[in-house]
Image (spheres, grey):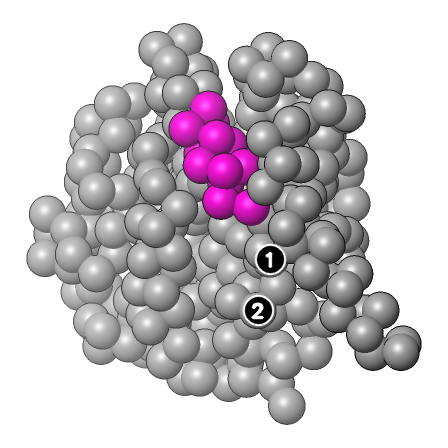
Amino acid sequence: MQRLFVVLAVASAYFSSPAAAQDWPNKPVRIVNTFAPGGAADYLARAVADGLSTALGQQFFVETRSGAAGAIGVNSVVATPPDGYNFVITNITMLVLAPISNPRLGYHPERDLSNIAYLGGSPIVLSVNSKSPIHSLADFVAHGKKAGKPLTYSSSGVGSSGHLFGETFASKVGIKVEHVPYKGAAQGLLDLVGGHIEWSAQTVTSSAGQIRAGTLRGIAVTAKERMADYPDVPTFAELGHPEFGSPIWFALSAPKALPAVIIGRMNGEINKILTAPTMLERMRREGMVVEAMTPAQLEQLIERETRFWRPAIERAGLMQK
């Protein structure tokens, strides 16, 4: 009898969900920001929330739940019903890097998440102190091959995109590097300016102030094309390394089995919001690159990134048991 009740309850929820989805949203909607306030993810979350509130006539609000490389915020949303009232800001770390290396996150993207929309990304820029004799990627590689010791570099932490980029690029060009992890981008960049390390693998958004001030020199950037505000910084692709053409990107996700009608509506509205001329200009100033994607295209991106980064994570010895 109890089993029959459960089956009937599940069936009732399934058959009523299309009607509920058509009526969505009829109450405030939560977007969980998994990063500290003030950063790129927080900016994206609030921009999307404001735009959706206007477009859909219901309040979308941002709640910050950071920590554990985003796992705290993701798990808080995974535990909710897939009814369109709980979303979470995710990124390459939460959807690709951490799931590869850590089986104890409490969630698995493929099993537990519906990925709604690509929000934008900030490319990694390989930068050096402006007083360095290195002015090009060829200079950098030649210096690395001649150096009698590994070239020290900063990133935002062990297992971060910057860390893995550094290890992967060094392996491909045949130089030795030593990773110096920091808890965030700022201190690592200051140490590069101060001459304590030799190069950095941080996002354009994080590095922009120092590059504009002339204390750091951008050597190459992981963008598909040169960025308008940094026309003198070539892309890795044009320098013969097309595999390094993806920014550190952010997405919007929700609990698995979110109704398709909600996914489609959210995706369409978010793409409109982020590709509006005023928003594109704001994102450009922040060192962010916007690209409208369907949910299927976002899934393809996640699959490509997973195939690319798994060997780097294994090579860096970051696989946990």
What crowding class fits label 2: few (fewer than 14 Cα within 10 Å), some (14-19), or many (20 or more)? few
Viewport quadrant of the N terminus = bottom right
Viewport quadrant of the C terminus = bottom right
Q: Secondary structure at mark 2?
A: helix
Write the residue at 48% across / 55% down.
92
Residue 255, relative to residue 172: is it above or below? above
Marks 2 and 1 sit apart, C-alpha to C-alpha, by: 7 Å
Quarter of the image for residue 8 reads: bottom right
Q: Is residue 102 left or right of residue 218?
A: right
Q: Does the segment drawn in magenta span residue 144?
A: no
Query: Principal SS element in the magenta part?
Result: helix
Q: Is residue 38 left or right of residue 244?
A: right
Write the residue at 15% across / 51% down.
237
Range of magenta residues: 259-270
Percent position of residue 86, x then y = 71, 41
Write the residue at 73% across / 24% down.
26
Quarter of the image for residue 252 reads: top right
Camera-side residue: 207 or 34?
34
Residue 246, numbered circle: none
The residue indicated by pointer 1 is 256
Camera-side residue: 182 or 301?
301
What amino acid is labelled 2 in the image?
Arg
Percent position of residue 187, x then y = 62, 46
Residue 212, relative to residue 123: is it above or below? above
Q: How many marks?
A: 2
Residues at marks 2 and 1 touching, judged by CB atoms closer than 8 Å? yes
Q: Is residue 161 left or right of residue 76?
A: left
Q: Inspect this view and state whether residue 5 appears.
A: yes
Q: Inspect this view and state whether residue 183 appears.
A: no
Q: Secondary structure at mark 1?
A: loop
Residue 111, numbered circle: 2
Q: Is residue 32 left or right of residue 226?
A: right
